Each structure stands twice: as C-alpha cells, then as structure tokens.
Amino acid sequence: MLSRPASAEPTLRRLRVLSAVALATFALIIAVITLWPGPPDPDGQSWLREFLRHGHAYGIPGWITFGRVEFASNIVMFMPVGFFGALALSRHRWLVVPAAAVASAGIETVQAMALPLRYGTVRDVISNTLGALLGYLLAAAVVAAVLRRARRGNRVIPAPAPVYR
C-alpha cells in the first residue's frame, strides 16, 4: 500500500472537518424523519401511490412500484451517511457501513416498538445499509482521487536535456 503524500494532508483534513459537520447535519435530519411519530408525509405517500397508478396507465413500467421507490429513497437517504461518515474518519473508513447498519437497526426497532403509526422493517435496514455502502464507495473514490492528485503534484519532472549547438 502506498503511503500518503504529505501534500494530501491539508486537503484530507479540510474534508474531514467539513464532512463531520455535514454528517452531523444529515444525522439530525434522518433522526427527525425516521423518529417522527407518524409518517413524514402521509399525503405525499398517497400522492406517490396515485401518481404511479396513473403513470402505469400512461407508460411508466409496471416494475416501478411504491415499494421499489421507497426502497430507493431509503438508499438515497443513507448515502450521505456513508459518504460523509467515511470522509470524516481518517482511518478505518469502512467502519461507517456497519455503524450505519446498527443505527438503522436501532431506528427500525424504535419504529416497531415505540411508534405505533410507523413500521420498522428489515427491508429498510437493508436499503439503508446499502445506501451507506454506496456512499462509502463514493467517498473511497474521492479519497483515492485526492491522493492520486497529491502524488502527481509531488513528482519530480526531469529537466530537459541541454541542447548543444
């Protein structure tokens, strides 16, 4: 494994700080959405069901269902957790994925046991964890790009050979 170039450290440090702030912000937003006593937008859910029903009559593929849209939205909701969580950590970035899975399981347990208008499901834990994994992979690509750029900047470019006339 290649060592980190010193020139990458300031950029990685800035990324860690900004990502920690973004992670805290997203964690608060997700907590409000998922631990609210009722569904976040019951009218929106019924609107989406109605939209899909009409859309299927006008050409939206039948495989696009409310359940699949909800699954995809849970993935999207947890992608920032994986992304900013991985960037906020300086080492062991991969730990953000199991941490997100545990947090998601906790959220779903609270929904199932303490929030009578909410449903806690294993399916949501799976989609949330998948979102965190995708966010982590994106963060790994960003870190790799920062390190690659720093290594390129540290290369010594040989001077051209002198030309004798």
Image (cartoon, rainbow, N blue to C red):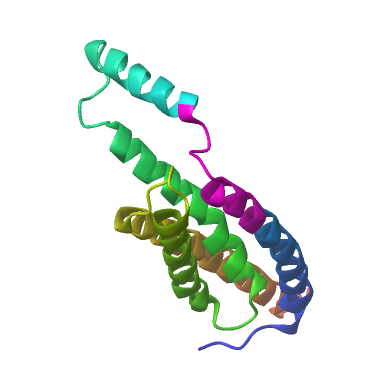
Residue at the left extreme, as displayed? 62
Please tell me whether residue 37 belongs to the stretch shown in magenta: yes
Instruction: Tell me residue 58's x, y (percent).
Output: 26, 10
Q: Quadrant of residue 155?
A: bottom right
- The residue closer to the viewer here, 27 or 81, is 27
Frontmost residue, 99 versus 138:
99
Task: Say whether residue 161 is visible.
Answer: no
The picture quadrant where one finds residue 53 is top left
**Residue 25, how many percent across, how many down?**
70, 55
At a point 27% along the width and 20% down the height, the residue shown is: 60
Left or right, residue 130 beside residue 90: left
Q: Is residue 80 within the magenta segment? A: no
Residue 88 x, y percent position in the rendering: 66, 70
Task: Report how many numbered discs are placed on residues in the image.
Answer: 0
Q: Is residue 59 above or below residue 110?
A: above
Q: Main secondary structure of the magenta part?
A: helix
- Up/down of 67 relative to 108, above or below: above
From the top left corner, tell me how far across and down residue 61 is, in percent. Answer: 23, 24
Q: Quadrant of residue 158?
A: bottom right
Image position of 7 (left or right of 58): right
Work out which quarter of the rendered image holds the C terminus and state it: bottom right
Image side of residue 150 versus residue 82, left or right: right
State whether residue 95 appears in this view. Answer: yes
Q: Residue at x 50, y 89 (%)?
A: 1
Name the residue: 65% across, 84% down: 4
Bounds of the magenta span? Answer: 26-42
